Image: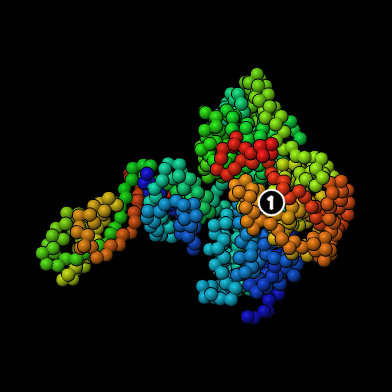
Amino acid sequence: MRHILSILVENEAGALSRVAGLFSARGYNIESLTVAPTEDATMSRMTIVTTGSDEIVEQITKQLNKLVDVVKVVDLSEGRHIERELMLVKVRAAGKDREEMKRTADIFRGRIIDVTDKSYTIELTGTTDKLDAFLEALDKGAILETVRTGVSGIGRGEWVLKA
Amino acid sequence: MELKLPPLAETGETLTGAEIAIRCLQEEGVEFVFGYPGGAVLFIYDALFKQKKVKHILVRHEQGALHAADGYARATGRPGVALVTSGPGVTNAVTGIATAYMDSIPMVVVTGQVPTRAIGEDAFQECDTVGITRPCVKHNFLVKDVNELAITMKKAFHIATTGRPGPVLVDIPKDVSQQSARFHYPEKISLRSYSPVVKGHGGQIKKAMQLLLEAKRPMIYVGGGAILGEASHEVTELVRLLDYPCTNTLMGLGAFPASDKRFVGMLGMHGTVEANMAMQNCDVLLAVGARFDDRVIGNPAHFAAGSAGRKIVHIDVDPSSISKRVRVDVPIVGHVKDVLAELIALLRASKEKPDAAALAAWWDQIGSWRAKDCLKYDRNAKIIKPQFVIEKLWEVTKGDAYVTSDVGQHQMWAAQFYRFEKPRRWINSGGLGTMGVGLPYAMGVKLAFPKADVACVTGEASVQMCIQELSTCKQYHLPVKLVNLNNRYMGMVRQWQEFFHGNRYSESYMDALPDFVKLAEAYGHVGMRVEKPGDVEGALREAFSLKDRLVFLDIITDQTENVFPMVPGGKGMSEMILSEDL
Ligand SMILES: Cc1ncc(C[n+]2csc(CCOP(=O)(O)OP(=O)(O)O)c2C)c(N)n1
Ligand SMILES: [Mg+2]
């Protein structure tokens, strides 16, 4: 099962390596990991997408909580939540494919943010599934480069993750 | 590098980082610092020199410093403190840190680091200390600002000693130890990201009581957490109140007295038949400060399959220890001592009593497992049996010594045959299984309890891994007794090769052994060799009567002896190999 963990950590040097080190040392999967400061400058927020049985994810949560720099951990996938990922894709867009490429981007609500006469750079936001679907919709040979941020997530409604 | 120090200051005044570090140790009531100097800690050593409160013990290798501090902590319950220099000082210390980490021993390790401006430049004796030690400490800090040093030291002691204890490392760059700051040591500290649960959940404790009272085949399984959590008294009271069987893990020996008839011995890979069979067949299991590790329950799949419908109650201060390898029914997170006290109070107040008939039948069953006498060995042998030596050691020390050990067969025999009555008397590396700990552990214990008998049960291979500490023992007059069960083999390795690798004794023979008697003498100690069973007791008595001398007893034991029972790795607990099977 896929789980999205939201983690508040002290904004200390080394906090990221403690979290990443825990995953590698205990053989847990990381599908994606994002981290950036929060509205409170003393804390950063990480979103980690991981897969594993309920038992494993329970252990991951417990082990994360044990890290001294970790302030709070929640499994967003346990409740209603929103997840988004940002992707930038550079695609071949020359000749007859150019128009088709724009149409496909439009269908996925992608925005073309850079253009040359042979390429487009498309920005796309959405769930991981949507980004995957977009890539699948493209001709493999047309994809020159992709970069994805990994998933960020937040709970729905008025519930907030606080220290 | 300028070596001039500002004048020593009074409390509340401006101190150098080095002085602050030492003052923090004083504030914490630290008696001993085990360490070894070097460039990055010169200022700290200078500050140490100018005071009397904290005594420094100069070891001969940083690994010895860490183990000695660890041994001190295991015997006293107070945090052990070590001080080493950057680079090789740190890398030498890593084995000791990892050893303490695996057994949750409270320690504060102060390390020197290259000056802040040189960090990352591959400076002389630089290593990424925080990076190298991160996976084997409870937490670590790099102090980049002298104004943060005192509070960091406070955090280090706080984190090391609370919740599930563990080693905490404080890395101090040389310039930070030289710079000055106003010294203020906070009395208390709270960390928003660190607040271990201490109080067990009342409702869960009630459920636990119910299950215990409903049990037909109960079992109480007590691990090292009960010792770390000072819960022996409560464990003993609970077991006696219920009259249920109790087993201790290798790390829990002494938590429940071995002389009590309810003690079924140690469990696990080299546990007794009665302990392992009772674990496998019980219907209600109470686990106290234990972690169901692979050396204890073997393969968790076999354990789960053991008794259909077995219910498990697990009390531990660390939530991540619960349901890690074995799913439990009633998890209770909290201080084992307090949870047990509540449980006892509930049981005393309850009108329900355990099912006496079922319990009697269960004890009969356990009696039949006991009758196998699984620890029997040949008492009439012409060659010295290692088990016999431990039995004699127990007799001679009246079962009241601190016993440290190394890792191997001798460790298991010490655990099986020295019947520990009290907690913190059995000092060994259970988690990491580090050869070489025995002698430095004994040093730490002897410093803590100078009047007590301290024996180090070791093997001729293990003892050579920290043998240099014989010199430290000379310098500080630490008259510990080494009981070297010399079988000329890495016995435990040889045993596995005999059982599982077709008797191919690949590199497990100890060739070119030193003359340990002469070696002991060379270090200024007493050495004795014992070759006949009839001489064992006399030699032990003589050794312990030499109150102010370290004695190295080199005891030539049966090379072919194996540790029984044995649960082969990956098997279930009831699949034991017994001596009679071979
Ligand atoms: C540092 C370290 N290296 C290797 C091992 C693997 N090992 C476990 S027991 C053992 C043999 C120990 O021999 P000895 O000290 O003579 O004890 P014996 O088993 O013969 O009683 C070895 C090599 C270990 N536990 N620790
Ligand atoms: Mg040996």
Which of the chains bears the disc numbered 1? B
Q: Residue shown at 32%/50% (left/top)?
A: A83
Give the x, y percent position of residue A133. 23, 52
Total marks shown come to: 1
Q: Say what amino acid the circle numbered 1 marks.
A: Gly
Give the x, y percent position of residue B317. 58, 43
Q: Which residue is mark 1?
A: B491
Looking at the picture, tell me which residue is in the foreground, B560 or A55.
B560
Position of residue B521 relative to residue A158, above or below, is below
For ligand 1, tell me if the residue under mark 1 lies within 8 Å.
yes
Q: Residue shown at 69%/57% (left/top)?
A: B509
**Which residue is at the far bottom?**
B2
Q: Is residue B215 found left or right of B193 in the rendered image?
A: right
Q: Quadrant of residue B299?
A: top right
Q: Quadrant of residue B251?
A: top right
Give the x, y percent position of residue B331. 54, 36
Looking at the picture, tell me which residue is in the foreground, B254 or B176.
B254
Position of residue B177 relative to residue B578, above or below, is below
Q: Residue shown at 75%/70% (left/top)?
A: B50
Q: Residue shown at 70%/67% (left/top)?
A: B36
Q: For the C terminus of chain B, which image quadrant?
A: top right
Looking at the picture, tell me which residue is in the foreground, B30 or B558.
B558
Q: For the N terminus of chain B, which image quadrant?
A: bottom right
Q: Is residue B515 found left or right of A82 in the rendered image?
A: right
Can I make out residue B398 in this image? Answer: no
Looking at the picture, tell me which residue is in the foreground, B361 or B160.
B361
Q: Is residue A10 found left or right of B489 in the rendered image?
A: left
Can I make out residue A57 in this image? Answer: yes
Is disc 1 placed on a helix, strand or loop?
helix
